[in-house]
Amino acid sequence: MRHLKAFHVFDVAASCSSFSEAAQQLNITHGAVSKQIKTLEAYLGVTLFYKKGRNVFLTQEGEKLKVSTRQVFTVLENTVNELRKPALHTLEVSCEPTLTMRWLMPRLSGFYESSGIDVRLSTAGGAVQLGTNGLSLAIRRDDFECHRDYYKTSLVEEWVGPVFSPDYWEKVKHDLGSITTIHSATRASAWQNWQQMSGTATDFTHHSQQKFGHFYFCIQAAIDGLGAAMGSYPFVMDDIKRGVLVAPFGFVPSGCDYILMSDKANLVGEEKQFADWLVDNLSQAIPKCKK
């Protein structure tokens, strides 16, 4: 087929709101994206995009072409991924860092023993591009805008609440104003959001604060007795069961879910086995003692 590269550039650009974003995903220049689109428009004899402000939008003809290119490139990507898979039963999965360290990794050996599937993890949050380096699944908190048409399976509703080391809670429980609140740069408004959702009478917004760059540092700081951290239940459930952390205020829904992202609606083989295992195990990550 003529202009196959232009069709690929169009397919990526059709999923984005700007040529700049498409250029970033394709690792080419904005000008190169524009050139490929113009080549394709000249070849087809139709206009595929129109500009409105700084963004670009598909014309009616562009929308029609997008349906076809997405089907074609999805089939191609899936076939390439299947051919590139090693003979061993392996699965490439991206997962948010704190969920990886505090929930998934301690349980992966059990999944391997029951399935014989070696799950190879990479850690990242937010937007993801499946198919890159064999990546077939991604576990995310659904608090970001995804520009790709991936299928999303809800794994569990997220519940959040403040967690303390037992010794620190004994120290501050009769003087709540002395609590040091621990904050993460990745969830800067976590305490404020929890306070609104929980309806607590105590105002924690003006308390002494400790700030860390990542969520998992915050939880470790709480374990070490440096203050109270806002805990997502899957991250702290094992420590609560062991008595390492306590959650005297309980937990409330955060308004987000943890989800599994895939480029296929009906998973098969290793992907389906892992997805079923995730759904079954994360469904238990709901606090028994809620607010």
Image (cartoon, rainbow, N blue to C red):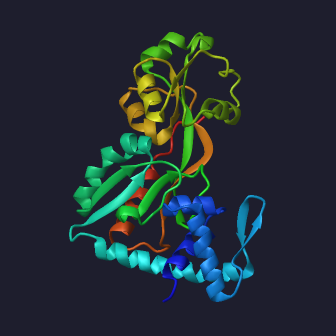
Name the one closer to the observer, 286 or 109.
Answer: 109
From the viewer's perspective, is 238 left or right of 172? left
197 relative to 18, above or below? above
Specify the quadrant that holds the C terminus. Answer: top right
**In screen coordinates, is 197 left or right of 120?**
right
Is residue 98 in view?
A: yes
Q: As drawn, is 156 to the left or to the right of 110?
A: right
Q: From this viewpoint, is residue 147 visible?
A: no
Percent of width and height locating residue 25: 52, 61
User: How far from the left and from the top, in percent, is residue 42?
Assistant: 65, 84
Instruction: Name which residue lies at 59% across and 15% down.
Output: 208
Name the residue located 28 percent from the left edge and 70 percent from the top edge: 85
Q: Quadrant of residue 22?
A: bottom right
Q: Is residue 173 left or right of residue 86?
A: right
Q: Is residue 255 above or below residue 236?
A: below
Query: Image quarter for residue 103?
Result: top left
Query: 74 or 216, which lies in front?
Result: 74
Which residue is farthest right? 52
Residue 206: x and y, percent? 67, 17
Residue 289 or residue 155, whichever sits in front: 155
Identify the image quadrant of residue 199: top right
With respect to residue 288, does 57 lie above or below? below
